[in-house]
Amino acid sequence: MWRRFLPLLVILGIVALVVWRMLYLGSVGERFNAGFFLRAFIDSVKLGSLYALIALGYTMVYGIIRLINFAHGEVFMVGAFTTYFLFTITPYALPAAIVMAIILTFGLMRVVELFRGSMRDPLVLGVGAIGVVVLTVALSAFTWPFWAAIVGSMLATGVLGLSIDRVAYVPLRSAPRNSLLITAIAVSFFLQNLGLLAFTNRQTPFRPDTPLTNPLAIDVGGTPVMTNWLLVAIPVVTLALVIALTSFVTRTRLGKAMRASAQDAEVAQMMGVSVNKVIATTFLLGSMLAAAGGAMWGLNFGSLNQPAIMGILPGIKAFAAAVIGGIGSLPGAVIGAMIIGFSENFLTALFPRTPTFLGITEFKDTFAFVLLILVLLIRPSGIVGEDLSEKV
Amino acid sequence: MARIVTPTAFDAIDPKKRVRNVALTLLAVGVGVFVLYLLEGVGSSKLVQALALFAIWGVATVSLNLINGTLGILSLGHHGFMLIGGYTTGLLMLDEAARQRILTSARSTMTEETLALSVSNLLRGVGLEALTTPETLWVRFLIAIFLGGLLAAFAGLLVGTPSLRLRGDYLAIVTFGFGEIIRLTASTRLFSAYTNGALGFPGVTSEFGKSIWWTFGVLAFTVFVISKLKYSSYGRAMQAIREDEIAAQAMGVNVAYHKVLGFVISAFFAGVAGGLWVSWLGGVRLDFFLFQLTFFFLVAISAGGTGSITGVLLGTAVVVFVRQYGDPLEESYSIQTWLYIASATLALAAAGAVLFRTLRRLRPRLHWGSWVLIGAAAVAALVAAVDPAVIEGTFRGFGMRAIFLSVLLIVIMVFRPDGMLGRTEFSWSWFLREQRTGPTDEERTQDAWLSNPAFGSPAGRAAAREQELAEDDTDAPAGGDDEGGR
Amino acid sequence: MAMLEVEGLRKSFGGLTATNDVGFHVDRGEIVSIIGPNGAGKSTVFNLITGVYRPDAGDVRFEGTSIVGKSTNQVVDLGIARTFQNLRLFTNLTVLENVLISQHHRLRSNWLSAVFRTPSYRRQERAMREVATEKLGFFGPRLQSFRLHQPVYVLSYANRRRTEMARAMATGAKLLLLDEPSAGMNPKETSEITQIIRRMRDEGGYTIVVVEHKMNLVGEISDRVIVLDYGQKIAEGTYRDVVNDPKVIEAYLGKKAGDDKREELADG
């Protein structure tokens, strides 16, 4: 019976330890006041939300085809750079505008199709016809505002996700899982180097003209903590996207097909679910979320790393988040992402550099891996996940 | 009634053939040594370097394949093991001048104590002054790479242990995580006294890493150990784990022990390869041990064929060739040239797709995707030929080699997941086409008789063949196709 | 003394109780069959004995010592080997390799001696090959000569079953647990396998526990039959007694009796 209360006890215990540690630090140094911890808390929530956006893509794909989509981190990177190229160098020259408009329109059609069921639906075709013209004009005549750049980037990156699935993963549906994973790694490398070639090979400033970066001061106990509106924007956008995704998965026909395929793809196929389409949809949705994450990542840090290293670490950490939360579970991915966000910011704040101790900041990139290994060893199904072990 | 072929204990190799095989092997080794000798004398230093790199990476890929191919676990942390071996060898073999420079440098994080770590001091400590002369540098190098291998093997033990509870792709991620943890912590204060932080250190002797004899010697030893292991009872047990872990355990194989054993042996050779790699590079730096390294090895293994050591070496040769001779891919060309190259590549891809669909009897031969490729190729060629505005300027194909290798890997995974050689291993009887791939007529008759004794008349050969087609019990002769294997 | 004693074995998965208070014993040299409708818990009993699952309650004793909590490979070391209902062969390896692998746990050389092929290792390897051919010989010459070196995936279903049985025998076990040895075989092959199981006991000296659905096979070979239903033992005895037991008939046929099953039971 006491097992039922175990999670609660663990959480309470952790909170108690954290509070005790905070109080202790407060007595050690003047610097460690409420503002110091509030800043760490804010950073944790923001980072956790960003990881969550990436982790959702991992968890959906893994839930259905049991593939660690190694390339997802690179999809995130492409999403960030596409946003960048939409709000900085628009308007485009006409040929580039036409190509981009076609890509965006295709993405738009696929999104509308999610609710209409067929590419031949009149609404989808209408959106396609109007979209190409409008987007070509928009891309070749106007400088895009940041919000439009995010939406555009989500559509373009969604198309990228679809293409990756179609080119690299569809031919391997029945292949051993290791082959699939190796292919995913290859795709990841391909995108990294293509990014180096096509985008840039150095750190890129990412400073769009948006009210979200306006400063915001929070007053705690007399010391103002300077931050900006991203503090609100990132969690809100994440929450909105997660709610949209969850209601899509639970309410719509295609969403139900997705859940059925996650349970047993083979049987779902026999029941008339087009599993390939379902998988394509997960890639579309996951990539769109990753693109939104990429855009806000850039906003949050003010710059983008060079393409070869930008995606890989956030990507793998987000995968770790998905596993920690319980792979295949949407809320699990968010919980796992928050855990990693907090471990990277709040935990380092709890063990800061003091005259007697050097701090643990330089190790923070390893926390995700250590957590991942621990969770896999102690509870392989993750915090809220189901058991995926093999039956004899 | 058909005569039943007496079963032999096993198809023992004819002693004559064994003698012949040994003779052929010795001959081949002799020829190989001679060729290497010629190449060393005649070939450019670039060629010698490429050959040495092939041997060094060969050590790494063959050992990685012990985990990936034989044990069937996708390990992505090989660069971590190589890092350990590399830094150990680097530190132990650092020459005196370099030690002095680091000691006096303000940015160095190494201390006098860590800089005192060297094989020479070690040997002096145990009273073997004779081995600290410049002439015996090779002994010290051997000791250094051996110690590097041992440390890496210890790390392999640490990585292998969680593998006992994890399966498949989770384990792949954990090995990746370990590899990254090793790399990320190497520059932190935990180890910066040994690694000099992110700076690393130059000044490791290149005498061995760039010598064909040393590198190929180590490669030969590695191939010997790994192949003997693979074709021993231990290797069979490891392959059983790859095929079906639960069944292997149910047949008495201690899965945990064999997995860890595989990891430890593989990590040892990875450490040795890391030592040679550092020597080839002439120094140590963190970015010599990026995940990219493991990726290259994966390409080599997958391209050549995970089931075959010969294939792995072949794949390594391809990857090393691209790395060492792929500079033209990354040079600066005019945009017009690039457009023509792109056009040709797309056209080739379309041709390949058509060929593939024809060979696999897929219809239509011209898939709409091929039309898209052809269209894109035509557009690129047209633009390059017609529009002078686009042609201006040049473009440098930075990173083209990695792109080429990743595309190669994707193509291989999609079209030939078993790699170039699949499971075919080099052996003399394979080379001389002596291997039996099917039953003899006599055995066929006997098989048919077992299924239905009524057909056992002496004249039953033809009937037996028919019988074999008709009867459920008889088996398909082993042909070249692997379609039954799952 | 009984070779294998099972007492009060219970195992549940979530809310489902797969076996509940199952107890039986197997004497040396016996052939015991476990029958029961689908989902009765027969394979679970095998998995519990061989250590794939750990029982929630109860005890399994082999030659007097409890083997609960031992891992699967330790159980094999002690002398219990099994086959699987859905064939678990090493499909990409050859027939010979499959049968050699099950002897690996008896190898008394470390990996270094194996790498350097010491004389002692070579001797053991030869011995292993002889054992392999001997065990494959139970099934006639059909798994010998060229077929030794064929990968398992080219074999027919029946030959795979035979290979799996040879593989289990080669472990050096005294007790064999055969999970549906005749599944997927035609009547002729079934009657052959029936003879072979008997010869395995008479010539090979194995004690055998069989889970089987084909009643004529069960009737022909069994010294004793144990019937499971919904995880519980509902009958035990000779084949004749068991098939006439009203509880067994009910378990197979239920209240709404169908005629086909009754015929099948009567066949034996």
Image (spheres, rainbow, N blue to C red):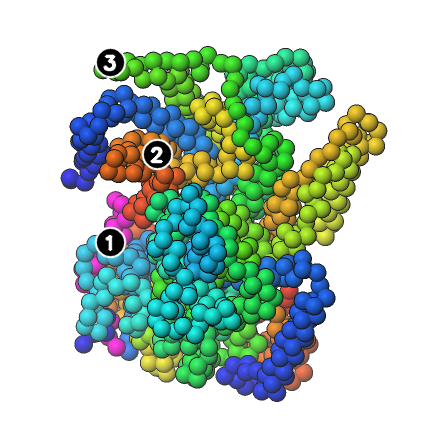
Crowding at mark 2 (Cα within 10 Å: few <14, some 14-19, many 20+)? many
In space, the residues marked 1 and 3 are separated at their CA atoms by 62 Å
- The amino acid at mark 2 is Glu
Callout in the foreground (2, 3): 3
Stretch of the chain drawn in magenta:
C5-28
Of labels 1 and 2, the one closer to you: 2
Q: Say if A232 sits above or below A16 in the image.
A: above
Q: Give me the C-alpha separation between circle 1 and circle 2.
A: 42 Å
> Which of the labelled discs sits on residue A35, or is there none?
none
Q: Chain of mark 3?
A: A
Which is the main secondary structure of the residues drawn in magenta? strand
Give the farthest residue toward the right.
B386
Looking at the rendered structure, the kind of residue marked 3 is Gly
Residue at label 3? Answer: A222
| Vertical arrangement, residue B281 with respect to residue B424, above or below | above
CA separation in Å, label 2 and label 3: 27 Å
Would you say residue C15 sits in the magenta stretch?
A: yes
Query: Where does label 2 land, which residue?
Result: A344
Callout 1, which amino acid? Lys
Q: Secondary structure at mark 3?
A: loop
Residue C11: which numbered mark, if any? 1
Q: Is residue B68 left or right of residue B460?
A: left
Residue at the location (44% across, 72% down)? B131
| Residue at image point 59% right, 23% down | A85
Label located before the other in sequence (2 or 3): 3
Instruction: Report in which chain the residue with disc 2 lies.
Output: A
Q: Are marks 2 and 3 on the same chain?
A: yes
Q: Nearer the viewer, residue B157 or C234?
A: B157
